[in-house]
Structures are given as C-alpha cells and as structure tokens.
Image: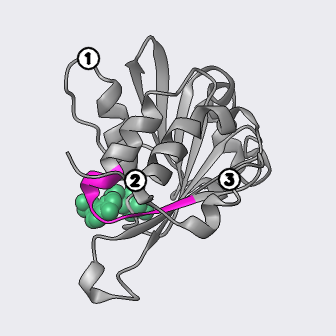
C-alpha cells in the first residue's frame, strides 16, 4: 500500500471554511487510487463528484478506482468516452460515471437522465464544464493537474484540489484531511 497523499500546507490552513479547498500531491497512480478509495467509503446516494482537469490528468483512473472499490466482485470499468454514461449497481445504490467531453448540447444532459441522477444516484462526472448552468451546487469538485509539463522527472505526479460549497463535504472529508495532515507532521 502506498503512503497517504501529501497535503499542501498552505491550503490546509484554509480547509476549515465550507468553501475552502484542500489540496495535495499524488505522486503515483497508486496514491490516486488510495484517495479515491477513501472518498468512495464516504459516499451516499445523491452525492456528485465533478472530475476536472486536462486530457490524461487521471480523471478516469480516479473514477475507475473509486467504482472498483465499491464493487463486491471485480468488473471492468471502461471509460465512458463514447457512450457518455456508464451505470453501475454498487453499495446498494446506482452509480453513474459520465464523460461529457463529446456532449453536443445541454438538452442531451436531460435526455440522458443525468439531472435526476444528480439527486438520487452517486455521480462521477468527467469534463463537468459541459454542464454549464446544470452544474449541481451540492457537488464536490475534484481538480487534477498534470505536473509533467513543469518537471519531466515527475511525470506520474498530479496535484489534486478539492473544493465544495455544500457544507456536508466538510464533515465527509474531515478524516481524509486529518490523515493527510498527520502524515506530514
Ligand atoms: N498520479 C497519477 N494519478 C492518476 N493517473 C496517473 C498518475 N500518474 C500516472 N497516471 C496515468 O495517467 C493516465 C491518466 O489517464 P486517464 O484516462 O485517467 O485520464 P483522463 O483525465 O480521464 O483523460 P481524458 O480527459 O482523456 O478522459 C493513466 O494511464 C494513469 O495510469
Ligand atoms: Mg477520462
């Protein structure tokens, strides 16, 4: 098992307000998987995670790790690049994994049934900027940034930032933030 993600101390100081971000470095795919598993264990129906970041940032890797950690028997988790949406029955609820990169119109969001899923299911959304005004205000924003452009020696390193407006995430994420903080002290 890899070590915990490394928090960015400047942002940790701001992690007490409901809208303040938490950020950390993820130095390998395994560290990203571990954080995804920790978040998975805290999810409930009606939770929505918006996975932001450029091509290759690790959005699908994060979503796949999260979904597989909730499965009772292992199954493939394909990227929904072409299907737009894949659904799963996990942990007694429906989970929707969407990749909206190829979305052609906002109406398609309604047609897919995504707006209802935001209320009832667990939703993991890649390329959530496509949601525009349909972006759910209760969502947790997970931004992954590639660092390889800055430093070729760290091509597996990602910078992750969690942001939220709904105060429920403050309680849900407390243990993760505390653990990441302790790892550094
Ligand atoms: N720290 C890391 N976290 C996540 N993925 C990583 C990390 N380091 C390397 N990778 C690799 O980066 C790749 C990320 O691909 P992935 O398909 O998850 O990107 P994506 O953000 O979904 O891109 P797209 O916008 O094309 O859907 C994977 O091959 C993964 O193994
Ligand atoms: Mg993807």
Q: SS at mark 1? A: loop
Q: SS at mark 2? A: helix
Mark number for residue 22? none
Q: SS at mark 3? A: loop
Is 117 left or right of 87, judged from the image as shown?
right
Q: Nearer the viewer, residue 1 or 104?
A: 1
Q: Nearer the viewer, residue 153 or 80?
A: 153
Mark number for residue 183? 2
> What's the residue at 65%, 59% (across, down)?
129
> What's the residue at 76%, 45% (across, down)?
18
Is 17 left or right of 60, judged from the image as shown?
right
Residue receiving disc 3 = 15
- Magenta segment: does it hold 105? no
In terms of sequence position, does the residue under pointer 2 or pointer 3 come before the other?
Answer: 3
Q: Around disc 2, counting alpha carbons within 10 Å, would you say few (fewer than 14), some (14 to 19), or many (20 or more)? A: few
Residue receiving disc 1 = 72
Which quadrant holds residue 116? Answer: top right
Q: Residue furthest front?
A: 185
The percent position of residue 64, horizontal first and vertical second, equals 33, 42
- CB of residue at label 2: within 8 Å of ligand 1? no
Q: Which residues fall within the magenta stretch?
A: 23-32
Q: Is residue 121 above or below residue 49?
A: above
Where is the C terminus found, in terms of image quarters? bottom left
Label 2 – label 3 distance at C-alpha: 16 Å
Circle nearer the viewer, 2 or 3? 2
> What's the residue at 40%, 42% (across, down)?
36
């Amino acid at each position: 098992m890899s070590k915990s993600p490394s928090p960015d101390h400047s942002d940790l100081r701001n992690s007490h307000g409901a809208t303040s971000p938490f950020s950390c470095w993820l130095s390998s795919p395994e560290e990203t998987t571990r954080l995804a598993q920790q978040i998975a264990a805290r999810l409930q129906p009606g939770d929505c995670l918006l996975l932001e970041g450029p091509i290759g940032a690790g959005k699908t890797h994060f979503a796949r790790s999260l979904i597989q950690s909730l499965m009772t028997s292992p199954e493939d988790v394909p990227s929904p690049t072409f299907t737009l949406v894949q659904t799963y029955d996990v942990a007694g609820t429906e989970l929707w994994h969407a990749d909206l990169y190829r979305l052609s119109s906002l109406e398609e969001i309604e047609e897919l049934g995504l707006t209802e899923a935001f209320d009832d299911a667990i939703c993991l959304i890649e390329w959530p900027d496509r949601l525009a005004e349909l972006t759910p205000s209760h969502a947790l924003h997970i931004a992954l940034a590639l660092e390889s452009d800055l430093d070729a020696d760290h091509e597996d390193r990602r910078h992750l930032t969690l942001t939220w407006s709904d105060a429920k995430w403050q309680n849900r994420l407390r243990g993760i933030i505390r653990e990441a903080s302790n790892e550094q002290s």
